[in-house]
Image (cartoon, rainbow, N blue to C red):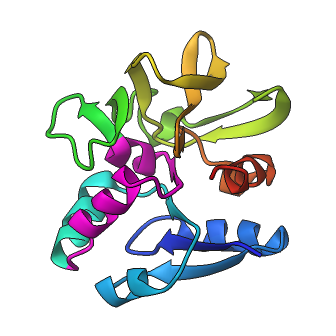
Amino acid sequence: MKTIAVLALQGGFAEHIKVLQSISVRAFEVRKEQDIKRPFDGLIIPGGESTVIFKLLEDFDLFYPLQDMIEDGLPVFGTCAGAILLANEVEGREAYLKTMDISIKPNGYGSQLDSFIAKEKFDNLPVKQIFVRAPLITKIGENIKILSKINGNVTAARQENQLITTYHPELSTDEVHRYFMGIK
């Protein structure tokens, strides 16, 4: 049985843990540096406010250890703000972890009032995609596998050990989490 660490500094971490438990995956919250010393098979960076999550990663001495783990091949899944944290380029601000070859625009689909739900395919599986102040991927690198699009915009992608969605799969179904479990 796999064990997944879920960054629990801010945002929708509890929903990810609930989905993982529903598919028989052990999960635990990461809040402090000692938490990442536990053995685990992958990491989820949830949605929330990317600037707050970044600040807390630094405050709790998690930023560089997690960046190193991801660069060393640890499977990581970033949703919404998590995708922003992984991006090499972030429009209008300094990029954070810079581990995934994408450019992203925070709140690219608009404000909270512009939130929406779409039914699209993720890796050929129909899934409900829930967008809340969602980022917009504006550029992707050569080694990026596109897993989902809406109106020509990439909404899910993978680069080797890294998976991102600009929407919140933890609020709908478990297909994306099951896909993540297959990343080695």
> Most extreme residue toward the top, as rendered?
152
Near-viewer residue (122 or 141): 141
Q: Is residue 159 above or below residue 72?
A: above
- Horizontally, residue 118 falls left or right of residue 72, namely right
Query: Residue 22, image x and y in percent?
Result: 83, 71
Near-viewer residue (10 or 83): 83
Q: Is residue 111 above or below residue 149?
A: below
Total numbered badges shown on the rendered structure: 0
Query: Residue 12, image x and y in percent?
Result: 53, 65
Q: Residue at x 73, y 69 (%)?
A: 20
Inspect the magenta stretch and tell me whether residue 76 lies in it.
yes
Q: Is residue 44 above or below residue 176?
A: below
Inspect the magenta stretch and tell me whether residue 56 lies in it.
no
Q: Residue at x 43, y 16 (%)?
A: 142
Query: Residue 175, image x and y in percent?
Result: 80, 47
> Most extreme residue toward the bottom, as rendered?
34
Quarter of the figure with residue 70: bottom left
- Horizontally, residue 130 falls left or right of residue 127, namely left
Q: Residue at x 50, y 38 (%)?
A: 113
Query: Residue 125, image x and y in percent?
Result: 85, 32
Q: Name the quarter where the N terminus is drawn.
A: bottom right
Near-viewer residue (1 or 170): 1
- Range shown magenta: 60-86
Q: Residue at x 55, y 21 (%)?
A: 154
- Horizontally, residue 113 falls left or right of residue 100, namely right
